[in-house]
Image (spheres, rainbow, N blue to C red):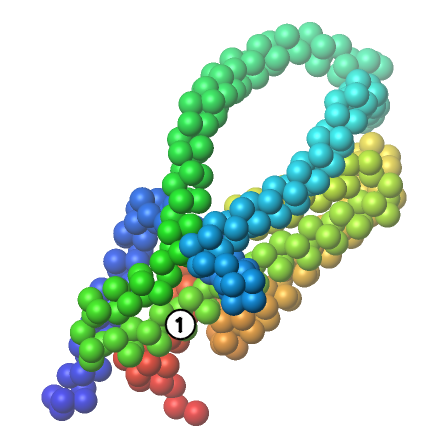
């Protein structure tokens, strides 16, 4: 076996071991170092603000870092406050009108019951009486199933608040120190590395960071586009909770197991069976638009942002799902990014063109 083949075999072995390490340890490592990882990302985001304070206003870097962290918190807090106030307003309106919606649902169910009676040849009201007679038992079962979960969930939420506050404090402190001593940290880490690998590591780091941010940017762009489209669609049909529902759909659409259909499909079916076919068709159009946007734009956006062909991105997503399950939607493109980066720094051979 030639030296070239030996080198390629060693490189492939290193890549294989690295991928196994990523699969088994990434989730655990991320959970342990998450405050510092977030701190690093926030530090990267606020670096332009620090440069403005430091270069143009002649403010020392330490104080510039503190001002940048405060500015970042203020902007996020302001935007969050506006969104939360709007969501709270819509939620209050929903609670106020809930009795009306409940009556509409009951009326719809009664009409369905009468339809079943006619279809099955029962006397009118038989289905309704059967449901009412069994309602107490059904309600009791639902209560017995949900009560422990709701109680445990509420207790877990309350008990996790101190931990969450501690997590946020550590993240903010880490952000400040990473921003303040950015150059010192970089020099320190650089000195710990062998000169032979330093250049390759810097290339890998820059490529991976750029590709990772590109992937995150692509997913956030998709979320925003789908959220805006759904909100506009709901505004067109004069839904009073357009922003609230649009935000929920936006978040669910980013989750592989759920998707926008979790909300829109049952809602459209309910409206269709209720006789409001026009509303159901509109909901179907909104859902179809959201699906088409994700199916057509995701490979293109992800591919453009990480620098690979959309077909390769689509294959990475599909193979990732087949190998790793739903988490493969994220792991597939990330592994593709990793392999592409190793090719760029000549750790792996490049494809012939």
In the rendered view, tell whether residue 126 sits above or below residue 260. above
- How many C-alpha atoms fall within 10 Å of the one at disc 1: few (<14), some, or many (≥20)? few
Residue lying at 29% horizontally and 79% vertically, measured from the top left = 199
- The residue at the point 14 percent across, 89 percent down is 3
148 to the left or right of 72: left
What residue lies at 31% left-to-right and 61% top-to-bottom? 185
Residue 334, located in which quarter of the rendered image? bottom left
Residue where numbered disc 1 is placed: 206
Q: Please, what secondary structure does the residue beneath circle 1 have? A: helix
Tell me the quarter of the picture where residue 89 sits. Answer: top right
Report whether residue 75 is seen.
yes
- State the count of labels: 1
Q: Nearer the viewer, residue 93 or 53?
A: 53
- Furthest-left residue in view? 1
The residue located at (42%, 27%) in the rendering is: 162
Q: Against 255, is 142 above or below?
A: above
């Amino acid at each position: 076996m030639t030296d070239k083949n030996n080198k390629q075999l060693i490189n492939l072995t290193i890549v294989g071991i690295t991928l196994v390490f990523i699969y088994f340890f990434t989730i655990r490592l991320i959970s342990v170092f998450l405050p510092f990882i977030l701190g690093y990302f926030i530090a990267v985001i606020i670096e332009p603000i620090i440069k403005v304070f430091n270069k143009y206003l002649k403010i020392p870097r330490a104080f510039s870092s503190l001002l940048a962290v405060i500015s970042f918190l203020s902007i996020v807090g302001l935007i969050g406050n506006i969104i939360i106030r709007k969501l709270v307003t819509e939620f209050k309106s929903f609670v106020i009108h809930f009795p009306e919606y409940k009556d509409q649902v009951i009326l719809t169910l009664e009409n369905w019951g009468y339809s079943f009676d006619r279809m099955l040849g029962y006397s009118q009201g038989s289905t309704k009486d059967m449901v009412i007679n069994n309602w107490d038992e059904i309600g009791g079962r639902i209560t017995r199933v949900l009560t422990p979960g709701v109680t445990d969930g509420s207790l877990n939420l309350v008990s996790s608040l101190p931990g969450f506050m501690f997590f946020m404090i550590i993240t903010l402190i880490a952000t400040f120190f990473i921003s303040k001593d950015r150059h010192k940290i970089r020099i320190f880490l650089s000195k710990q590395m062998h000169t032979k690998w330093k250049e390759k590591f810097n290339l890998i780091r820059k490529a991976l960071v750029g590709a990772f941010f590109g992937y995150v940017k692509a997913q956030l762009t998709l979320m925003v586009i789908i959220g805006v489209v759904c909100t506009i669609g709901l505004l067109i049909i004069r839904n009073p909770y357009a922003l609230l529902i649009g935000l929920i759909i936006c978040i669910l659409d980013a989750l592989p197991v759920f998707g926008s259909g979790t909300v829109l499909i049952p809602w459209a079916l309910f409206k269709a069976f209720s006789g409001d076919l026009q509303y159901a068709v509109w909901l179907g159009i909104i859902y179809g638009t959201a699906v088409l946007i994700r199916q057509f734009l995701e490979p293109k956006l992800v591919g453009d942002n990480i620098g690979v062909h959309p077909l390769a991105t689509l294959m990475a997503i599909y193979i990732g799902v087949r190998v790793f399950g739903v988490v493969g939607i994220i792991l597939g493109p990330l592994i593709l990014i990793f392999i592409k980066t190793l090719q760029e720094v000549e750790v792996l051979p490049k494809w012939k063109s």
